[in-house]
Amino acid sequence: MRRAATPFASRRRPRRRTNRGFAVADALVAAALAGLALAGLVASTTLAARQLRDVRRASLVASLAVDALERLRPGDGLVFERAWEATDGRGRPTRLRAAVTSSARRETLATAVAP
């Protein structure tokens, strides 16, 4: 059996998809997200580079202090005093100073670490 044709069957139009503008919007959202991710990556890389520089400087100060101790040690029985000082720069470089004093000499090492 055939169905009876409805009077409005000829007036129906096929539906068109109306997502023309979504491709542009999707591209803009993707570009914004990529920009945010790139900004975060640059910020974390900069922070890591600063921390690495600070660790290198602190390591250098410690190494120099050990060398100074070795130079002061002529033999057994040497009495020496060590002092460490860090001055907060509050926006300026933080100053670090290590002093080693014995009965014969005094060695002082100083450096500054950028904020």
Image (tube, helix red, strand yellow):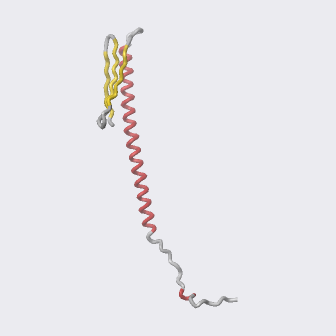
Q: How many labels does the image show?
A: 0
Quarter of the image for residue 44 reads top left
Quarter of the image for residue 69 reads top left
In the rendered image, the vertical position of residue 101 relative to residue 17, given as above or below? above
State the image coordinates of residue 36 (x, y, percent, origin top left): 41, 53
State the image coordinates of residue 85 (x, y, percent, origin top left): 34, 25
Residue depicted at 37% across the width and 35% down the height: 53
Tell me the quadrant of the picture where the C terminus can be found: top left
Outermost residue on the left side: it is 92
Residue depicted at 32% across the width and 18% down the height: 107
State the image coordinates of residue 1 (x, y, percent, origin top left): 70, 89
Q: Which sits in the foreground, 91 or 71?
A: 91
Using residue 47 as the reference point, say whether residue 13 is left or right of it: right
In the rendered image, the vertical position of residue 101 relative to residue 27, given as above or below? above
Using residue 59 as the reference point, say whether residue 106 is left or right of it: left
In the rendered image, the vertical position of residue 5 relative to residue 36, given as above or below? below
Residue depicted at 40% across the width and 44% down the height: 45
